[in-house]
Image (cartoon, coloured by chain):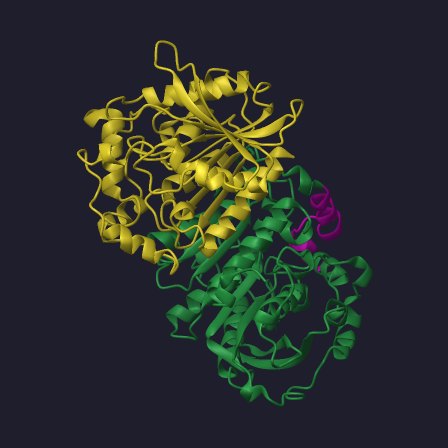
Chain colours: A yellow, B green
Amino acid sequence: MSLQTQPPVPFDPQIQPVVDFMATQPPMSRESIAASRGVTASPFPSAEELVKGLPITITERVIPGPEGAPDLEITVLSPSDLGADERLPALYNIHGGGMVVGHRSWESGRLVDLMTRHRVVCVNVEYRLAPEDPFPAGAEDVYAGFVWTHANAAELCVDASKIVVMGGSAGGGFSAAIALMARDRRGPIMAGQLLLCPMIDNTGSTVSAQQYRGLGTWTREANDLSWACVLGEELAFSEDAPAYAAPSRADDLSGLPPAFIEVGAAETFRDEDVEYASRIWAVGGQAELHVWDGGCHGFDMYAPDAIITQAALDSRDSWLRRIFA
Amino acid sequence: MSESRLAPCPYDPQLLDALGWFKSTFEPIPLLPHTIAENRAILAGITPCLAASLEGHDGVRSSERVAAGPRGEIALTVLEPADVSFTADLATHSAADPANRSSPAPANPATAAPAEARSAALREGDVAPGSGRAGVGQSPPRPAVLVIHGGGLVLGDRFFAAGEGIGLVERYGAVAVLVEYRLAPEFPGSAPVEDCYAALQWLAANAGELNVDPDRMVVSGFSAGGGLSAGVALMARDLGGPALAGQLLGCPMLDDRDESDSTRQYDGIGVWDRTNNRTAWDAVLGERPHRNVSRYAAPSRAADLSGLPPAFIDVGGAEVFRDEAVEYASRIWATGGSAELHVWDGGFHGFAGFAPQAQASLASAVATDSWWRRVLKLDGGKAA
């Protein structure tokens, strides 16, 4: 039976219009990458727009990057009425975009929504993108930002023992990667890793990676291009790729912080994400897995009012309450 | 077992009290071939009678029916809205209210009745079929759910699932049918699932009289009831039976082979552990290695999972059935089928029904409610 002949899992009726629209857009190419970067290219509302009327303060900062590398830009979102002695849980967010496109500002909506549900500080980090800066630039950037956040928790009014790393897509992959890095380097302990449709397997060998060839909000082709940009042609789809680039390549998934893994049933990353959870369980680790029927890649951002989005947000909230308890 | 136990995933601390209560109440003795009868008596002793389950649920009425099955009569209890014009849009119950969630109701020993008293108590809840039905013809047709109880295919009766059925009536205006299927080892192999399938055929045949929408019939169950629900869905597909709008597989018992990591992790610990599960499957399928296993009896054995109704699969991360549930969902997706999967970190077998106030249980109730509203096409799918 040829994998290529497998029909895709259908999209939820409320998600289908998003996918139909996406089909009218030109596919991502090496040439188009540059146009999908930065604040100005954002298809989503800005943080300033989103916090209007909300008691949330936005602070832009520059912090040291990895040794010998450029500084990092971060955006800190805090409750406006934060008391100087207060110590809140924190979400350290790493944006998505295949490790090649996007900007942290695009995900302000996801963070502002979480801040309306939880009293937390959010640190939203920028990192270097491939192909100009291939692996390990991005991974080292976001690891450095996490270490800085942990070390400067008091100044941020953050409880250092309650920092959850999170991200969607590439940001989910980076979150999983820095959980591995923190474990292996005996770095700061994180309270949890919130992995939203994470991009973790470079091999493209799963059934779902075959089912969403040329289909959906993040196609097989876009994914292949991204891995080639990050890892170079030789390692792009190789089993020998480094685990900090593609966490599915890690031999050992024991000793990791509790994971929350959310993914759509109708997307490329479904099977790699289910496998990652299964491998964590197999070694006695903690993982929660939610696979939403008919969800496309990033359904929560593309279809914020869809029923499955609302239900997915409730599941995230529940897990965060358990982690922060 | 020959292999050593694998390190288990830890339990959610919020669930530990309920885990202890489950263990001491439902599983004071392990399930072994010679303790099946004793375990049946224990479960019967703590399963509330129907009248007790219906107490405080004035909007639900019950009637007793009989379906013809391959091995004789099958007792059914039909639960439905007492008000024939009731629709889900009028429901005011929140899914987060544990009293209304769709899972096995935690048996309250205070309202439990001894087995011999239950059939008598049952009559108090009876409503004669057809009574008070004026106006049915004018009311919109209702969704229906075949509710299949758990108990490892060897224990329990249909009233064990009464809480689930009542919740479905109250929240979605559904007609819920509880089925008394035959148990192993007296009725091994595919006898239990064939009874359940006969109940589905009865439901479809009586859809008109029950004012049931034939396009919104779902099969649902927890544990053995989840495995039987999967089996009924396979039978309906293969035998050209009634069309199902969905299958809810709660912590489902799907695979007799006992080869997963999760079965090796929960060997001698927790509830419904590896020993109980092996005993139950051996009661159904005989000594190992099981031979000529029907895919309807052990749905994981089915080679083809295409063409099935949308599945909702919910399981604990810390239980024997975790891996087989995940694999079943993955195999449905691989064929292009619809399935939703939720695996709750640190959840023991059936945690949501036994620790309804825990955070994970409340979230499971919300996710489950979301799926019901999508699959039954109710009020835009929003929670009431």
Q: Between residue A180 and residue B40, name the one nearer to us.
A: A180
Left or right side of B155 for A222: left
Q: Residue furthest top?
A: A68
**Considering depth in this image, is B241 or B217 the residue closer to the camera?**
B217
Locate residue A85: give its quadrant.
Answer: top right
Where in the figure is residue B351, as x and y percent of width and height?
Answer: 64, 49
Residue B116 is situated, as x and y percent measured from the top left of the image, at 78, 71
Image: magenta residue range = B17-37
Horizontal and vertical percent position of residue B188: 55, 64
Evaluate whether residue B320 shows in this view: yes
**Relative image position of residue B117 (x, y in whole percent):** 80, 71
Q: Is residue B309 magenta?
A: no
Q: Residue furthest right?
A: B110
Disc count in the image?
0
What quarter of the picture does the C terminus of chain A occupy?
top right
Q: Residue furthest bottom?
A: B134
Which residue is nearer to you in this view: A156 or B100?
Answer: A156
Query: Is residue B285 shown to the viewer in this render?
Result: no
At x 60%, y 23%, the residue is A157
Can you say whether B193 is above or below A227 in the image?
A: below
Q: Residue B26 magenta-drawn?
A: yes
The main secondary structure of the magenta stretch is helix
Q: Is residue A318 above or below residue A164?
A: below
Which residue, as the protein is rendered here, is positioned at the far front? A53
- Tell me where residue A170 sits by quadrant: top left
Identify the image quadrant of residue A69: top left
